[in-house]
Amino acid sequence: MTRRLLSLSVWAIILFLLWLVLVGTLASLELYAGAVAAAIGAVAMGLVRSHGLLQFRVEGRWLGGVWRPVAQVVPDFALVLVLFRTVARRELPSDAYVAVDLEGAGGRVRSAGWRAVAAAAGSVAPNTVVVDVDGRRRSMLIHKLVPERGPSRPL
């Protein structure tokens, strides 16, 4: 019971902080709304987990490699200008799908939690979107707006 209460509290805090980041204000009405939304979200997460619908977990050590795709966010915003220029000229972008080998990730690839972290982190920068992470083939399929830009390695 204590573990479940701790889990609900952690989820409520995470969701409340996410709310604050998204609304961008500390107005009292938003604080109240965020607290209610976080409580509803935490209870919903508890229900989903209690029914066995969330069968993975995320380990803190996996987050160590998240800096690589996050560091690419600012440089990739220059690509927005490239996209506008391409659209203005009525041209198609020179996008590509890139397969990335995940052999260096070891046994973590088999974990659904690691694949979720890799997909979320890999899709942060504007140039890349993770399309699929295949644990059996140990590969990740990434769509790149400008193929020659940005890292091609996962977390």
Image (tube, helix red, strand yellow):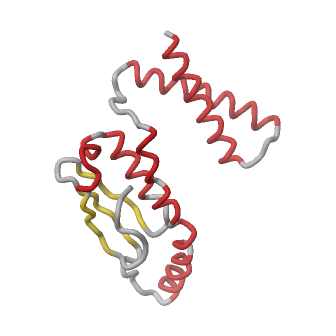
Quadrant of the image for the C terminus?
Answer: bottom left
Residue at the limit of the structure toward the right, as seen here: 28
| Residue 43 percent across, percent down from the top left | 53, 22
Residue drawn at x 41%, y 47% is 117
- Left or right relative to 40: residue 111: left
Number of callouts in the render? 0
Q: In the rendering, at what x and y percent does residue 53 appear?
A: 35, 27
| Residue at the farthest bottom position | 89
Q: Quadrant of residue 98?
A: bottom left
Quadrant in the picture for residue 130:
bottom left
Placement of 30 over or under 124, stated as above or below: above
Instruction: Specify the farthest residue to the left.
Output: 137
Q: Where is residue 76 drawn, in percent x and y?
A: 52, 72
Q: Is residue 126 left or right of residue 40?
A: left
Identity of the residue drawn at 82% across and 40% down: 27
Residue 10 x, y percent position in the rendering: 57, 27
Residue located 25% across and 48% down the image: 106
Depth order, front residue of 101/88: 101
Q: Residue at x 27, y 46 (%)?
A: 109
Up the image or down, 110 lies above or below 85; here it is above
Compared to residue 65, the image places residue 78 above or below, namely below
> Is residue 98 found left or right of 42 in the rendered image?
left
